[in-house]
DNA sequence: CTTGCTATTCACCGGCTGGTGACAGGTTGG
DNA sequence: CCAACCTGTCACCAGCCGGTGAATAGCAAG
């Protein structure tokens, strides 16, 4: 190597117009990167989600993302891990003072809680949209973390309640949760779903009523 | 301008190893471009969908896409127009020899038909995924074309059947179609949805049964 | 102060993207 | 014959992307 030869190619140091100093603090930087990544994903979606964009958003060099998270994959995985606490943060464990006497009571409450939680969390919506759009390792892991947390929560709520015999609860519940997810995703993007407007609080009441009716229709 | 100066910069003409001639046929080329675009979107998804990729897929220069379709936007719009016939192609207009006596009969049949049609059409799935992932002008127009065609079909099937009073059919149907769409999308990407496996024919029978139960639960 | 470690930044690479202007060659009509 | 037109191709541009090697700046111990 000829460092002197390289030195000629390097641009001379500019006069630093902004002598602002970033504090040297790895933990804080790691957090800033993670926050920037989550914010970016929530606000811009997965389309323009990349190393450069995250680094720009975090106000640091992308090299640090490679160093601290091992690249975008690691960062996404960190988001997934961080997401494990989503259910706990967003959805109450208790029954909110209600008595859940039947499986129908339970599922109605779960469906409505899930609807509201998803509606309130743009990051989660983007991740769900990502899940149905791509099938990379990244997304699979994210999806896994999400579904695991959700399943755990449902199990915890269920207690000893069981559906009526003869009903394939797994399949029916999959349909119900699928309905909620698509409804909220579609609303988040276009403000409506299959001809049903989903903008005002009143619109959402209609949706909630329909959801209740569906759940009750199946589980009584 | 100095053409001679430019000429020096141009690479000299290579010996043409492949004297294959593309037929000079605008209509055929336009069709090839449209086909390539649909194929690409169906197979690769909207993520890597771009001018260069389509041109590569169609085996022609991207300039022709600008010339004939006015860019990607125009091409997408052409796909949308082309899509208007989706319903007619994929879903029968008649009742398949069944007697649809009640609104419940109708919705059960519609839901199942829609499920199968979506399952059989990867392009449509990609478009639906696109719809919930982005909110650009492109996608909006595509989405509009799709929903318009679908609404027309439903209306045609409905005839004079009406739901029971006191039921918000628009909201309930939106939930049902949302459920079908998310279920099929999720299955297409990961082979399952909310813990319900969706790979074998038997899996899909379960899903269909659950769907029927939900529809019947609401509409009787 | 010097040495060494760590956090942070910088400069650069190859590759791909969307977009454009110029050119080549066949076809048609005067 | 030439001129005008149409189809198709090419070379090139600026800009962004992910990725990497090396320089730099601050802190701490010797």
Image (spheres, coloured by chain):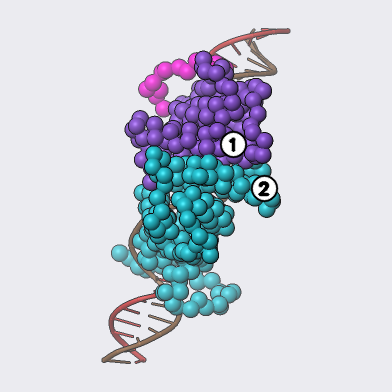
Chain colours: A cyan, B purple, C red, D brown
Q: Nearer the viewer, residue D20 or B93?
A: B93
Asked if residue A106 lies left or right of residue B67, the reply is left
Q: In the rendered structure, are the residues bearing label 2 and label 1 in contact, judged by CB atoms less than 8 Å apart?
A: no
Asked if residue C15 lies left or right of residue B145, the reply is left
> Principal SS element in the magenta part?
loop
Q: Position of residue B160 (x, y in %)?
A: 67, 23
Q: Position of residue B169 (x, y in %)?
A: 63, 36
Have a look at marks 2 and 1 and say if they share a chain. Answer: no
Q: Which residues are magenta?
A: B14-29
Residue at 38% across, 52% down: A144
Q: Position of residue A156 (x, y in %)?
A: 40, 60
Instruction: Determine the chain carrying the residue at label 2.
Output: A
Q: Nearer the viewer, residue A65 or B144?
A: B144
Query: How much space separates mark 2 and mark 1, taking CA atoms?
Result: 14 Å
Q: Nearer the viewer, residue B133 or B56?
A: B133
In the depicted structure, whether residue D13 falls above or below residue A100: above
In the depicted structure, whether residue A218 falls above or below residue A12: above
In magenta segment, residue B21: yes
Instruction: Determine the chain carrying the residue at label 1.
Output: B
**Category of crowding for the residue at label 2, using alpha-carbon neighbours closer than 10 angstroms: few (below 14), some (14–19), many (at least 20):** some
Q: Is residue B118 visible?
A: no
Residue at 64% across, 25% down: B161
Q: Which residue is mark 2?
A: A203
In magenta segment, residue B117: no
The answer to which quarter of the image holds residue B219 is: top right
Residue at 47% across, 55% down: A101
Q: Is residue A196 visible?
A: yes
Instruction: Give the quarter of the figure containing the N terminus of chain A.
Output: bottom left
Q: Nearer the viewer, residue C5 or A141?
A: A141
Residue at 51% across, 15% down: B97
Q: Which residue is mark 1?
A: B173
């Amino acid at each position: 190597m000829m460092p002197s030869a390289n030195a000629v190619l390097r641009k001379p140091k500019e006069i630093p117009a902004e002598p602002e100093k970033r504090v040297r603090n790895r933990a804080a930087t790691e957090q800033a990167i993670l926050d920037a990544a989550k914010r970016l994903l929530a606000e811009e979606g997965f389309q323009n989600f990349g190393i450069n964009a995250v680094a720009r958003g975090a106000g640091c060099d992308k090299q640090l993302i490679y160093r601290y998270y091992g690249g975008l994959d690691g960062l996404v995985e960190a988001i997934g891990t961080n997401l494990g606490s989503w259910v706990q943060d967003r959805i109450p464990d208790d029954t909110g003072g209600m008595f859940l006497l039947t499986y129908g009571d339970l599922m109605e409450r779960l469906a409505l809680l899930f609807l509201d939680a998803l509606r309130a969390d743009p990051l989660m919506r983007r991740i769900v949209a990502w899940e149905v759009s791509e099938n990379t390792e990244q997304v699979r892991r994210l999806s896994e973390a999400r579904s695991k947390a959700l399943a755990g929560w449902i199990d915890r709520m269920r207690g000893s309640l069981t559906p009526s015999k003869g009903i394939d609860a797994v399949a029916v519940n999959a349909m119900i949760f699928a309905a909620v997810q698509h409804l909220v995703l579609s609303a988040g993007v276009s403000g409506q779903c299959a001809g049903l407007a989903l903008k005002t609080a009143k619109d959402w009441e209609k949706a909630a009523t329909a959801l209740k009716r569906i759940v009750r229709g199946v589980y009584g």
